[in-house]
Image (tube, rainbow, N blue to C red):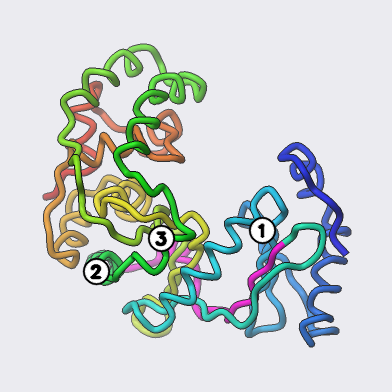
Amino acid sequence: MLPVVETEEQWDVLAEDEAVLRAGAEDLCGRLGLGGVPLERFTEGSVPVYAVGGALVLKLFPPPSARDGVVEERVLSRLHGALPIPTPEVQAAGEYVNGWRYVLMSRLAGEGLATAWPRVPDAERGRIARECGEALAVLHGLDPEPLAPVLGPGDWAAFLARQRAGAVERQRERGLPQAWLEQIPEFLEAAPLPRAPERALLHTEFMREHLLVDPADGWRLTGLFDFEPAMIGDPAYDLVAVGLFTTRADPALFGRLLDGYGRPADPRLLMAYTLLHVYSHLPWYLRELKPSATTLDDLAQEWFGTA
């Protein structure tokens, strides 16, 4: 049985206690009729995730993240069979004990695209990029309103205003050098942020780490997962993680992806959303992608331009 967790600090301590977490996962599996099925914890993820045998995955949400469990359940239920890329099918979900929630879902086949990428032939990389764009187009074309009761932020303009008000300080806390910090206010002031964008269902972390492929079947895309950070908002917001972590500032790949997506993207808008994103960490992006640009305008072209 999993213990009471009331604060993020308590969760940070418990997250490292695998004996307690595994005992809770085993108890829950027993209640779900899966007692004795082998459990194997995945190393990735901000919450505990276990493979249950070879066919199922159990995701546990501590009380501070219980809402994420509701989001994951509702979004996965909405998406089952709706996208060109398979998504997990919810088998069971709900409350466990002491405020914990869980989602039991089907396990997707394939290998993580992030680890497989160095072995993927160039021609297949382009095809994968295009198919990612096609999948995003379908995702963004779905009616998001049935999910509005559980997905934020509700008022998109108010959300952007809050993010904009804290944009400089957020990056300062993450260690962004002053030469970049002083550019942010003017860049956001001139950015082409739409006042009333279309409302779309957003994954928000569409990247190689959340995609699966089958190397034995022509590198076919076999899975898209991790929908707990899903939101409803401007479709362009979803292209931030795409440009940074799926095509990784490769203009040819980003161009192929946008071909599949079926619409162009304004690099300056995507750069603005990079600064306003809830998970924005510009110093990390700079370390990962090592751009040559020294201004936000040039960085927009380098990261989100197309060949």
Q: Amino acid at mark 3?
A: Ala
The residue to which callout 1 is attached is: 43
Q: Amino acid at mark 2?
A: Gly
Q: Which residues are drawn in magenta?
A: 101-124
Q: Give the number of the mark in front: 1 or 2.
A: 2
Q: Nearer the viewer, residue 126 or 236?
A: 236
The structure residue drawn at horizontal position 27% and vertical position 45%, both measured from the top left corner, is 249
Q: Secondary structure at mark 3?
A: loop
The answer, for residue 123, to whether it is visible in the render is no
Q: Is residue 145 magenta?
A: no
- Picture layout, residue 32 above or below residue 233: below
Of residues 298 and 137, the one drawn nearer to the viewer in this rendering: 137
Image quadrant in which you'd find residue 198: bottom left
Q: Kindly identify the residue that appears in the image at 75 percent across and 37 percent down.
A: 9
Residue at horizontal 37%, vertical 38%? 159
Residue assigned mark 3: 148
Which of the marked residues, 2 or 3, is nearer the chain's N terminus? 2
The residue furthest bottom is: 33
Q: Is residue 283 visible?
A: yes
Q: Nearer the viewer, residue 285 or 12?
A: 12
Q: Is residue 281 left or right of residue 101?
A: left
Q: Which of the 4 quarters of the picture holds residue 155?
A: top left
